[in-house]
Image (spheres, rainbow, N blue to C red):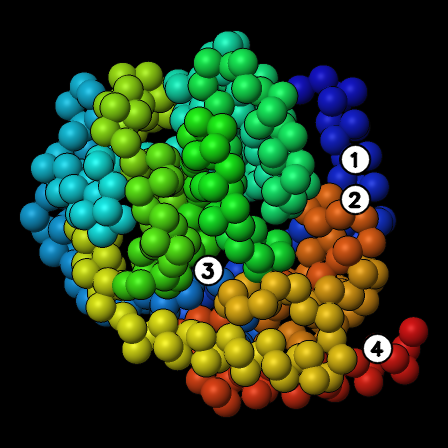
Amino acid sequence: MPQQVSERLRDDLDELSSRKLLKTEQEIVSPQSAHIHLRASGERLILNMCANNYLGFSNHQALVQAAHAGLERHGFGMSSVRFICGTHSVHRALERRLTDYLRTEDTILFGSCFDANAGLFEALLDAEDAVISDSLNHASIIDGIRLCKAKRFRYANNEMRELENALREARHCRTVLIVTDGVFSMDGVAANLPGICGLAKRYGALVMVDDSHAVGFIGPRGRGTPARHALENQVDILTGTLGKALGGASGGYVSGRGEIIAWLRQRARPYLFSNSLMPALCEASLTAIDLAENADDLRQNLAARTYQLRQGLSNLGFQISGSDHPIVPVITGDAAIAVQIADFLLARDILVVPFSYPVVPQGAARIRMQVSAAHSAEDIERVITGFRLAKAHVDNTV
Ligand SMILES: *Cc1c(COP(=O)(O)O)cnc(C)c1O
């Protein structure tokens, strides 16, 4: 490539590096789990506090076996998009199972939830329509909205007054869609679904919820944030991922009104132009849903460990965002302090990840941990102790 391009990219990378914003990746050399081996940490077992492994399914033996059986029965790949010759009966079975689990009318699978959100808005909305989006929505929602021609409105996180203003402004549009994450991933805060659904009803708007950080472990039987508020019937579109609590491999879906799903099969570009999911993955996902549906014990443990961590860190004087979600963000404000704490904890064999601008607002750096049902009370106690020592360490060095 032209020297000018490589120089520019090298300069940009150097700049990130000098500002300590270069993301590096820890290589895991064991299966994903609450306790892992890192290439950089040799024989030491590392307590993992940053996977989306909410129910501990990432290396669940029932899922491993279901995937093995799926490989034996269905082979490896489909080598086709769904509408050409890439629809296997296990795809339809998983779509029906998700529909039944989420109590919707129909479901369409995507390669990822990112793809689901990327394809949804462009297929459904045109220039006469409006989309009203929470300011903290996931990047895939932001990108999906960019791809459609609808008028765009944005409201500050969970600010119902601002949402109502936008609904008033958009009232002459043909279709108005309110879009929200069920749980906001950087803050561990849930969307105000009762407020949103109430306003949607009053103004005749549709509601779309991305429940990626809820499906499998929030609400009765893990059916998600709409079920938690008994609002399943008022959410028109529910997107989610198979890549977090439900096994953590990959795959996403849109579930909801029958006509919407039928239209997406005709028009959603990531569905039409990207390969269908590996059948063995679908087979294991069916098992994951069976397990999640009956995992009240795991959800109880997850809630107890989450409470323990949030309470323990609050008692130490740390500022924790949210109230009861297993996403536990410890707000440090200063990016360098977040990095210092993370380094300190890793030296004590605890893996956490610091987040700073532009992933979170300037001056709102944080360490975001995620509790898993696979964590023990001792694991959480170790983390709290680690933070106590890290605090003393940082106070001494700042
Ligand atoms: C993780 C996440 C996604 C992306 O899901 P993938 O299946 O990994 O593409 C989309 N939306 C939200 C809210 C998420 O948290």
Q: Distance from label 4 to label 3 (Cα)?
A: 28 Å
Whether residue 332 sits left or right of residue 96 in the image: it is right
Mark positioned earlier in the residue sequence (3 or 2): 2
Residue that label 3 marks: 52
Residue 280 percent across, percent down from the top left: 19, 48
Residue 23 percent across, percent down from the top left: 67, 51
Which callout, 3 or 1, points to the residue nearer the camera? 3
Secondary element at tag 2: helix
Mark positioned earlier in the residue sequence (2 or 4): 2
Name the residue furthest left. Answer: 73
Residue that label 4 marks: 394
Pick whichever, 9 or 81, lies toward us: 81
Q: Amino acid at mark 2?
A: Leu
In contact (CB < 8 Å): disc 3 and disc 1: no
Q: Distance from label 3 to label 1 (Cα)?
A: 30 Å
Whether residue 44 sits left or right of residue 244 in the image: it is right
Whether residue 252 sits left or right of residue 47 in the image: it is left
Q: Amino acid at mark 3?
A: Asn
Label 3 near ligand 1 (CB < 8 Å)? yes
Q: Amino acid at mark 1?
A: Asp
Residue name at image x 28 percent, y 63 percent: 221
Mark positioned earlier in the residue sequence (4 or 1): 1
Residue 41 percent across, percent down from the top left: 57, 74
Q: Residues within 10 Å of mark 3 (few under 14, many from 20)?
A: many
Residue that label 2 marks: 16
Residue name at image x 54 percent, y 14 percent: 172
In contact (CB < 8 Å): disc 4 and disc 1: no
Residue that label 1 marks: 12
**Residue 329 seen from this side:** yes
